[in-house]
Amino acid sequence: MNIAIKHAAARGIDVDLQLVPKAKALLGKFIQNVQNIPAMPWKEVPAFINL
């Protein structure tokens, strides 16, 4: 996100360069719980699609 804001500023678009730090301060820390979802065996896919 910060790269896009800096790119816009470099192109002369009026943007707030402090946008990303402000958003992070307002939103707080994001905790992501990662959970693996096992893949379906490829041989079972046709039967699953034809439900």
Image (spheres, grey):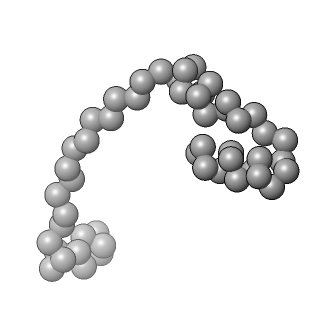
Quarter of the picture holding the C terminus: bottom left
Quadrant in which the N terminus is drawn: top right
Name above or below for residue 49 compared with residue 16.
Answer: below
**Image position, residue 5 (x, y; %):** 68, 45
Q: Residue at x 25, y 41 (%)?
A: 34
In front here: 42 or 25?
Answer: 25
27 or 35, nearer to the observer: 27
Residue 14, x across and y down, in percent: 84, 41
Residue at the location (77% across, 47% down)?
Answer: 9
> What is the x, y in percent for residue 44?
16, 74
**Residue 49 falls left or right of residue 41:** right
Task: State the image quarter where residue 15 is shown.
Answer: top right
Q: Is residue 14 above or below residue 10?
A: above
The residue located at (27%, 35%) in the rendering is 33
Nearer to the camera, 43 or 12: 12
Count up the numbered dots. 0
Would residue 38 be found to the left or right of residue 27 on screen?
left
- Residue at (14, 72) in percent of width and height: 41
